[in-house]
Image (cartoon, rainbow, N blue to C red):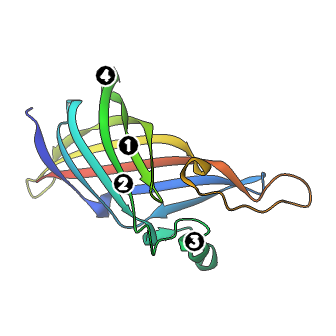
Amino acid sequence: MAKTKWAIDPAHSSVDFSVRHMMIANVKGTFQAFDASVEADPADLTTADISFSIDTASINTRNEDRDNHLRSADFFDVENNPKITFTATNVVKTDEGEYDVTGDLTIRGVTRPETFAVVFEGSGKDPWGNEKVGFSGSGSINRADYGLTWNAALETGGVLVGDKIKITFEIQASRA
């Protein structure tokens, strides 16, 4: 298949994360608004052009007070940093249908290289004849690398919020 433009289907896609809370549990959340520009041959992502943006205000951890705190200057500062962006700079095939996608991740005005493991899940046509492709991926980042350093010490030792953020995503796209 030749390199093709793909449009993200947000109704069948997700961008999720988890972080240690109080050093005893994980809190999960999702970003509800995101978009991407993808030009790729799904059978060979090594030549793909990928850029992704996430609306930071769309964060949802199922707790309104926590979400508002995450939107504040203590964390994402959504008023001054409305987007998280990722632009792929290198895609390496690691196995059949599996890739390491490295790119420039920008959070809160700080840009750093990060790598995510991506799996091509397959392709097919929906009942209306539209060509679809699916991808899943995962990786982790250190939130302190991006200036997300707010924390609180715990009486029992340790901190309220861990530094390692695990990121997972499921993407379904249609031929644009």
Q: Residue at x 31, y 40 (%)?
A: 88
The residue that disc 3 covers is 73
CB-based contact (under 8 Å), mark 1 and mark 2: yes
Q: Closer to the N terminus: mark 1 or mark 2? A: 2
Q: CA distance from mark 3 to mark 2?
A: 18 Å
Q: Residue furthest top?
A: 95
In the image: residue 153, left or right of residue 7? right
Q: In the figure, 114 relative to 144: above or below?
A: above
Which residue lies under the disc numbered 1? 104
Residue 30: x and y in percent read 48, 62
Q: Earlier in the sequence, mark 4 or mark 3?
A: 3
Q: Is residue 151 left or right of residue 108?
A: right
**Helix or strand or loop: what does disc 4 sit on?**
loop
- Sequence-earlier tag: 3 or 2: 3
Q: Mark 3: which amino acid? A: Ala
Q: Amino acid at mark 1?
A: Asp
Percent across and percent down for residue 45 are: 24, 32
Q: Could you tell me how far apart the alpha carbons at marks 3 and 1 are, in whole angstroms?
A: 23 Å
- Residue identified by numbered label 4: 96
Q: Which mark is residue 85?
A: 2
